[in-house]
């Protein structure tokens, strides 16, 4: 195919489908089975096509499907013909094909949409994944930060010898004119909520089983939607459960799950995500929306970094008896699988230059920084990254002041930061109303820094409270903080977490077990620590939680909590507190953060109306958080001292919300 524009006449494609229908079903199905298997095993330049209508015919003609319809009708106590009719409607709605021309056109369109980026692919594990794909179907589970994610992943896989995936996508993206093209290039459109529709769930399981038995590779975004904060969100377990059930129905000996990290230097969508975090309604996806989105991709936005995590064996993770376990144990197994996928995504996400620079600027307490200030903060950060041998795409970009200047220019061009150059030297700070945008880039890398931030808080606690048993008391403090933040970050299991905290403290000083026993020595160790990260990593979360806790404490215990009005109240009160400088940054004013704080409160039983003692427990949570905010204020003072800046006095304890 030439390099000029490609025009697809969908009407002619439909005519082609109609012309195929009169052929005899058994011969046609046999041929399509052979072609589907060939397409699954070879790249996109195969001459075979897979047609959605014929996929439906093949599935519904199988004995497995017909027997399942009768069993489902018996279980639901519905007429079999009604169940069959609804099931066929659902199957036609979700069935996808892989027409060679459509795959090619969609690939060209995707390349045009993603033209703002250069793809940086980490080749570690590519050969391993390719070998696994020759023996088993693969399920790619990427992080989801942009609408561009599938448009970035597909060409990267195709260029490395993989066949095109079947991509599970929300049916809200099936709008004309892209929907028909996407469906013919392997997009499987499914409903976003399946609650209560047992027939739809059953059909989805059957379709996934069909895809696995044919050897097709799958792809979906395990968070269920784009991250609004830049860090990984909690996994959605529904599709993982349907995958496990389809696998246990038989037909394949294993399925290999491939965690995938996708990280952008800059992202057009961040502006809209900031508005949504402040409570604005999500803009609907439609034709005018896609036109605006396409236009916005004309500017260069740096690189998109693609990395593959260590594969997981579905058979190994579930075990041979998963299907006969009690329901709760099956759920726990799927939850462990989902959490492990997220850990493996995080473990290969590269540290980016934009992530490090925004980390420095956001922790400056509203001050503008010079390039020399940023260099002074970055040097120990890069040293820490090196000592931990973390994956990074940042170090070459940040060598010397010239490298820092280029990263700053990229952020200025994106409107994230501003530069004032009319004084004695240029100074840089996060632009007005761009704090959450800057936080999005910082949060891409924040998971690597959480345990270090907790280690600093353990030292602060040791400096304020005399530890009788330094190791045991320090461990207990770390576990308390882990419990407080467990809905925000993916922590290792408790045993591994304790070892991770020990490692962080050892990086600070190998004599930490001795020093924690003395408040003075613990305080001196904290002052010597470079870099100071606790406030940069945790302040926005803890301050948002404190707003939630105080609003709960202000309510009578018998009043029920309705999420939407309560979160709106937190936003309104948070704005007031920010204007009064009683919280440190507008980064804390986020519906996402308030919602997680409310989740924590609900987990602790603080939202149950009429619960005896709930008022005292709400007040206790607020006190716990207020103490923690005070410690983060002191971390901010130490960090500013690192660059020789005179710190502004933090709000007094009584001035906090």
Image: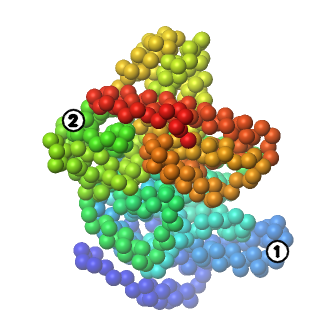
Q: Which residue is mark 1?
A: 78
Q: CA distance from mark 2 to mark 1?
A: 73 Å
User: How many labels were placed on the picture?
Assistant: 2
Q: Position of residue 641 (x, y in %)?
A: 33, 27
Q: Nearer the viewer, residue 184 or 650?
A: 650
Q: Which residue is mark 2?
A: 372
Of tags 2 and 1, the one toward the viewer is 2
Q: Position of residue 440 (x, y in %)?
A: 41, 50
CB-based contact (under 8 Å), mark 2 and mark 1: no
The answer, for residue 74, to whether it is visible in the render is yes
Q: Kindly identify the residue that appears in the image at 49 percent across and 72 percent down.
A: 284
Q: Determine which quarter of the picture holds residue 108.
A: bottom left
Left or right of residue 391: residue 4: left
Q: Is residue 71 above or below residue 162?
A: below
Position of residue 537 measured from the top left corner of the image (x, y, whole percent): 44, 38
Local secondary structure at mark 1: loop
Task: Classify mark 2: residues with Cα within 10 Å, few (<14), some (14-19) or many (20+).
Answer: some
547 and 403: which one is in front? 547
Color theme of the render: rainbow
48 relative to 358 in the view: left or right: right
Q: Earlier in the sequence, mark 2 or mark 1?
A: 1
Q: Nearer the viewer, residue 313 or 497?
A: 497
Q: Is residue 212 above or below residue 348?
A: below
Q: Is the N terminus in the top left, top right, bottom left or bottom right quadrant?
A: bottom left
Q: Looking at the image, can residue 490 be seen?
A: no
Residue drawn at x 43%, y 88% as measured from the top left: 12
* Quarter of the image where the C terminus is located: top right
In the foreground, 614 or 256: 614
SS at circle 2: helix
Image point (30%, 51%), residue name = 417
Q: Residue 449: x and y, percent?
A: 43, 35
Quadrant hosting residue 291: bottom left
């Amino acid at each position: 195919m030439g390099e000029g524009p490609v025009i697809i006449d969908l009407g002619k494609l439909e005519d082609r489908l109609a012309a195929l229908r009169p052929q005899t079903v058994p011969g046609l199905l046999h041929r399509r089975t052979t072609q589907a298997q060939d397409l699954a095993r070879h790249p996109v330049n195969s001459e075979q096509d897979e047609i959605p209508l014929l996929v439906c015919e093949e599935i519904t003609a199988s004995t497995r499907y017909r027997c399942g319809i009768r069993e489902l009708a018996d279980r639901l106590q519905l007429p079999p013909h009604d169940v069959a009719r609804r099931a066929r409607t659902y199957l036609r709605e979700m069935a996808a094909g892989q027409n060679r021309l459509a795959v090619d056109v969609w690939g060209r369109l995707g390349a045009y949409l993603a033209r703002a980026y250069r793809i940086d692919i980490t080749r570690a594990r590519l050969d391993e994944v390719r070998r696994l794909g020759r023996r088993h179907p693969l399920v790619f589970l990427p992080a989801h930060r942009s609408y561009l994610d599938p448009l970035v992943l597909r060409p990267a896989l195709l260029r490395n010898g993989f066949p095109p995936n079947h991509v599970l996508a929300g049916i809200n993206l099936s709008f004309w004119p892209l929907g028909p093209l996407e469906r013919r290039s392997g997009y499987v459109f499914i409903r976003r909520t399946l609650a209560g529709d047992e027939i739809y769930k059953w059909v989805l399981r059957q379709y996934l089983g069909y895809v696995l038995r044919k050897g097709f590779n799958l792809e979906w975004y395990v968070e269920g939607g784009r991250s609004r904060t830049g860090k990984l969100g909690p996994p959605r377990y529904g599709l993982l459960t349907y995958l496990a059930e389809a696998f246990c129905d038989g037909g394949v000996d294993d399925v290999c799950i491939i965690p995938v990290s996708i990280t952008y230097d800059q992202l057009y969508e961040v502006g809209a995500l900031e508005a949504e975090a402040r409570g604005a309604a999500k803009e609907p996806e439609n034709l005018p929306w896609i036109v605006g989105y396409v236009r916005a991709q004309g500017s260069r936005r740096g690189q998109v970094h693609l990395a593959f995590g260590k594969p997981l064996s579905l058979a190994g993770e579930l075990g041979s008896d998963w299907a006969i376990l009690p329901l709760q144990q099956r759920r726990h197994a799927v939850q462990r699988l989902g959490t492990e996928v997220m850990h493996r995504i995080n473990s290969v996400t590269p540290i980016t230059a934009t992530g490090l620079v925004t980390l420095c600027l956001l922790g400056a307490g509203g001050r503008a920084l010079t390039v020399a200030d940023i260099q002074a903060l970055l040097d120990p950060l890069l040293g820490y990254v090196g000592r931990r041998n973390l994956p990074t795409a940042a170090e070459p970009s940040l060598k010397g002041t010239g490298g820092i200047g280029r990263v700053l220019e990229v952020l200025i061009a994106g409107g994230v930061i501003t530069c004032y150059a009319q004084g004695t030297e240029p100074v840089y700070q996060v632009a007005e109303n761009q704090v959450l945008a800057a936080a999005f880039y910082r949060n891409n890398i924040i998971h690597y820094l959480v345990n270090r931030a907790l280690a600093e808080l353990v030292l602060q606690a040791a400096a304020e409270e005399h530890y009788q048993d330094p190791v045991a008391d320090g461990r207990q403090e770390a576990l308390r903080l882990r419990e407080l933040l467990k809905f925000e970050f993916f922590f290792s299991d408790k045993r591994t977490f304790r070892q991770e905290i020990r490692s962080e403290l050892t990086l600070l000083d190998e004599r930490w077990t001795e020093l924690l026993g003395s408040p003075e020595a613990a305080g001196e160790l904290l002052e010597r620590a470079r870099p100071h990260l606790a406030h940069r990593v945790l302040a926005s979360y803890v301050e948002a939680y404190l707003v939630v806790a105080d609003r709960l404490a202000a309510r009578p215990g018998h009043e029920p909590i309705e999420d939407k009005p309560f979160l709106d109240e937190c936003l309104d009160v948070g704005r007031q507190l920010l204007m009064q400088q009683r919280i440190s940054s507008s980064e804390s004013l986020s519906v996402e953060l308030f919602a997680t704080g409310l989740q924590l409160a609900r987990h602790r039983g603080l939202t149950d109306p009429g619960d005896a003692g709930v008022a005292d427990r709400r007040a206790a949570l607020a006190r716990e958080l207020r103490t923690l905010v005070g410690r983060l204020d002191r971390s901010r003072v130490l960090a500013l001292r690192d660059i020789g800046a005179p710190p502004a006095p933090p709000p007094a304890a009584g001035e906090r919300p």
